[in-house]
Amino acid sequence: MTTFTLYATTAAVFLILDVIMLTLVMKPLFTRHIGPLLAEPIRIAPAALFYLAYVAGLVYLVSMPALKTGAPLILPALIIGLMAYGTYEFTSWSVMRDWQWQMVVTDVTWGSVLTAFSAWAGVTLTRMIHG
């Protein structure tokens, strides 16, 4: 039950905050630079697969060890965010003509902070719920 709570709380925090950021910041930024390339409407299935898998990896690699043994939490989660979002952004910037450094900096910073905060929040909420 603890694992389910950890996954659910981490996923909820991650998704709620990411939807807000995507709506208010990322969509306008990406529209400005690569608008004609964006899918309308967005493809929900690939997005859902990303969120499900990404949060599962975060919980398995960082949050569960932190919850069980007190292993470090913030820095490992931040590094996972840097690696994941950096892989996407720097690869895109390398191979796509209209990709801009503003997109890279904004998304990598956001993904790193979001990942670290979501891991921390998931562990904190799980500890509160399960005492």
Image: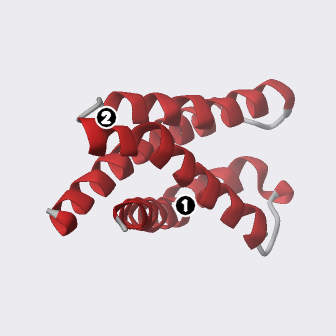
Q: Is residue 52 visible?
A: yes
- Residue at image point 52% right, 53% down: 55
Tag 1: Cα neighbours inside 10 Å, few (<14), some, or many (≥20)?
some
The residue that disc 2 covers is 74
Near-viewer residue (95 or 123): 123
The mark that comes first in sequence, 2 or 1, is: 1
- Residue at image point 51% right, 33% down: 80
> Does 56 appear above or below 99?
below
Counting from the top left corner in percent of width and height, residue 29 is at: 61, 51
**Badges 2 and 1: C-beta atoms under 8 Å apart?**
no
Q: Quadrant of the C terminus?
A: bottom left
Q: Amino acid at mark 2?
A: Ile
| Quarter location, residue 12 | bottom left
Outermost residue, bottom side: 41
The residue that disc 1 covers is 22
> Does 71 appear above or below 55?
above
Counting from the top left corner in percent of width and height, residue 13 is at: 38, 63
Q: Amino acid at mark 1?
A: Leu
Looking at the image, is mark 2 or mark 1 nearer the viewer?
A: 2
- Residue at image point 67% right, 66% down: 48
Numbered disc 2: secondary structure: helix
For residue 99, side relative to residue 126 (left or right): right
Near-viewer residue (19 or 36): 19
> Does 35 appear above or below 76?
below
Near-viewer residue (124 or 84): 124
- Residue at image point 54% right, 66% down: 23
